[in-house]
C-alpha cells in the first residue's frame, strides 16, 4: 500500500515539476516575511514621566490596559480603555488605527507584545509603558494599588 501511495505522489510531483506554471496557485496574500513589519522595541516605549506629562497636557491619545479582568479590577489608571491582550485580534476594530495608543500591563512585557501585535495589524502610533502599572504606581501615583 505504501509503495502505491509513493508512486502516486512521485507521479504528481513529476507533473508539477514538469509544468510548474500550470500548477502554481496565484499569490493571494503576502508571505510571512513580506507581511511582518520590522519592530524595534526601543522605538515603541514610553516612560511613566512622559505619559504623566501627556495626561497633564490633555493630549489626545488612548490609554489601553491589556491585563486580565481581575488585574484591572485590582488597579488601573483612570481613563483607561480595557481590552485583554488575548482579545485584541477580535476587538482591534474598537480602536482607531490613526489614534496614538499607549498600552500598559503589570510590568511592561505584555504591553510590548500588544504594541507589536497592533503594529502588525496596521496601527502606527503605538507605544508600551515601560515598567507597566507597577512602575507607574511607584514613580507617579502611589494611590494606584500595587500587586
Image (cartoon, rainbow, N blue to C red):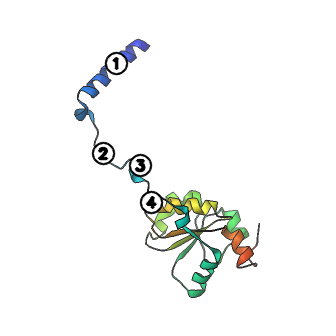
**Looking at the image, is mark 1 or mark 3 earlier in the sequence?**
1
Q: Do residues under tags 2 and 1 come within 8 Å of each other at their CB atoms?
A: no
* Quadrant for the N terminus in the image: top left
In the rendering, at what x and y percent does residue 4 appear? 38, 13
> Which is more foreground, mark 2 or mark 3?
3
Determine which residue is flagged by label 2: 27
Q: Quadrant of residue 138?
A: bottom right
* Element carrying mark 1: helix
**Looking at the image, is mark 3 or mark 4 earlier in the sequence?**
3
Q: CA distance from mark 2 to mark 4?
A: 20 Å
* Element carrying mark 2: loop
The residue at 30%/45% (across/down) is 27
> Which is more foreground, mark 2 or mark 1?
2
Binning the other alpha carbons within 10 Å of mark 1 as few (below 14), some (14 to 19) or many (20 upward) gives few
**Looking at the image, is mark 2 or mark 1 earlier in the sequence?**
1
Determine which residue is flagged by label 3: 33
In the rendering, at what x and y percent does residue 120 appear? 46, 59
Determine which residue is flagged by label 1: 8
- State whether residue 133 is above or below residue 5: below
The residue at 29%/39% (across/down) is 25
In the rendering, at what x and y percent does residue 128 appear? 58, 67
**Looking at the image, is mark 1 or mark 4 earlier in the sequence?**
1
Amino acid at each position: 500500500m505504501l509503495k502505491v501511495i509513493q508512486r502516486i505522489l512521485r507521479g504528481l510531483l513529476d507533473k508539477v515539476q514538469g509544468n510548474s506554471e500550470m500548477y502554481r496557485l496565484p499569490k493571494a496574500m503576502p508571505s510571512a516575511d513580506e507581511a511582518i513589519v520590522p519592530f524595534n522595541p526601543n522605538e515603541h516605549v514610553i516612560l511613566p514621566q512622559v505619559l504623566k506629562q501627556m495626561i497633564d497636557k490633555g493630549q489626545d491619545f488612548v490609554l489601553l490596559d491589556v491585563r486580565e479582568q481581575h488585574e484591572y479590577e485590582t488597579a488601573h489608571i483612570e481613563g483607561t480603555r480595557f481590552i485583554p491582550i488575548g482579545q485584541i485580534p477580535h476587538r482591534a476594530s474598537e480602536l482607531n488605527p490613526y489614534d496614538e495608543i499607549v498600552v500598559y500591563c503589570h510590568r511592561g512585557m505584555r504591553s510590548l507584545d500588544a504594541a507589536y501585535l497592533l503594529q502588525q495589524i496596521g496601527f502606527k502610533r503605538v507605544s508600551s509603558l515601560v515598567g507597566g502599572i507597577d512602575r507607574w504606581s511607584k514613580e507617579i501615583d502611589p494611590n494606584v494599588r500595587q500587586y
